[in-house]
Amino acid sequence: MKWIVRSILFVTCLLLFAQAEVALCQDQITASRGETVSNLQLGLQNTGLIGYEAYADARGDAASWCVPMRLLFGYVGPGETKSATYRLIIPRDVSPDTYYLFWDCYARSGSYTKHLFSSTVRITVVAAMRDPVLLLPLWAVVCAAALAPLWHWTKKEKRYHKKLSDSTDYVVDVNHN
């Protein structure tokens, strides 16, 4: 009987006093297709009067891109702030667009779970940005194509001057007698 009364009191306290707010969350991310964005954080602050175990679940368009999809904060005491780190792995085949990731934060005590808050992350996927080093072979071909006619022309001029100087031993001035 005491156990039931204690459980009911604890659940009532959890309902009345378990409050939290988002403490740290990057709400807008821009990344390219195939990119991995690391060290993203989600934090929560317990503003209530009792402590609880807290976790957050990912949902939405980009939930499958999160590693891990469930963030565990552990025990969060009254007035305490905890954060968890995750990363986003943007698929290569996703189209450039805006996607949303929702973090639903929960407090848990035994078998009872209470939804605390939701946090929204807006993810803008852009076309893949090119690495300039990967463009070096292309620039080599462009330079070779642009410089080849000049190189050929200078070689042709040298051959023409050489032939002209070999065939003439003296210069004849036709304007003067």
Image (tube, rainbow, N blue to C red):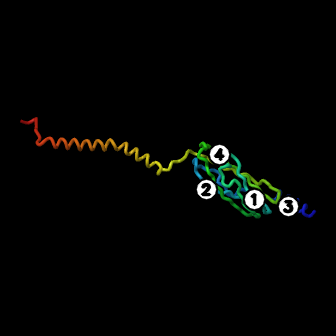
In the drawing, what numbered circle is on residue 38? 2
Quarter assignment of residue 145: top left
State the residue position of label 1.
Answer: 54
Q: In the rendered view, would you say 61 is above or below 12?
A: above
Q: Could you say where residue 17 lies in the image, as x and y percent from the top left?
A: 81, 59
Q: Who comes first in sequence, dot 2 or dot 1?
A: 2
Element on which disc 2 rests: strand
Q: Quadrant of residue 49?
A: bottom right
Horizontal and vertical percent position of residue 173: 10, 38
Residue shown at the point (6%, 36%) measured from the top left: 177
What's under tag 3, amino acid-wise? Phe
- Residue behind mark 4: 99
Q: Amino acid at mark 1?
A: Ala
Horizontal relation, residue 177 to residue 127: left or right: left
Residue 177 shown left or right of residue 80 in the figure:
left
Going from the N terminus, do you reach mark 4 or mark 3 first? 3
Question: In the image, what residue type sits under mark 4?
Answer: Tyr
* Pointer 2 with pointer 1, Cβ within 8 A: no
As measured in the structure, the alpha-carbon distance from the residue carrying label 2 to the one carrying label 1 is 22 Å
Q: Is the Cβ of the residue at disc 4 closer than 8 Å to that at disc 2?
A: no
Mark with earlier residue (1, 3): 3
- Mark 1 residue element: strand
For label 3, the residue is: 10
- Looking at the image, do the residues carrying marks 4 and 3 touch, with CB atoms under 8 Å apart? no
108 relative position to 132: left or right: right
Disc 2 from disc 3: Cα separation: 38 Å
Q: CA distance from mark 1 to mark 3?
A: 16 Å
Secondary structure of the residue carrying tag 4 is strand
Measured as percent of width and height from the top left, residue 38 is found at: 61, 56
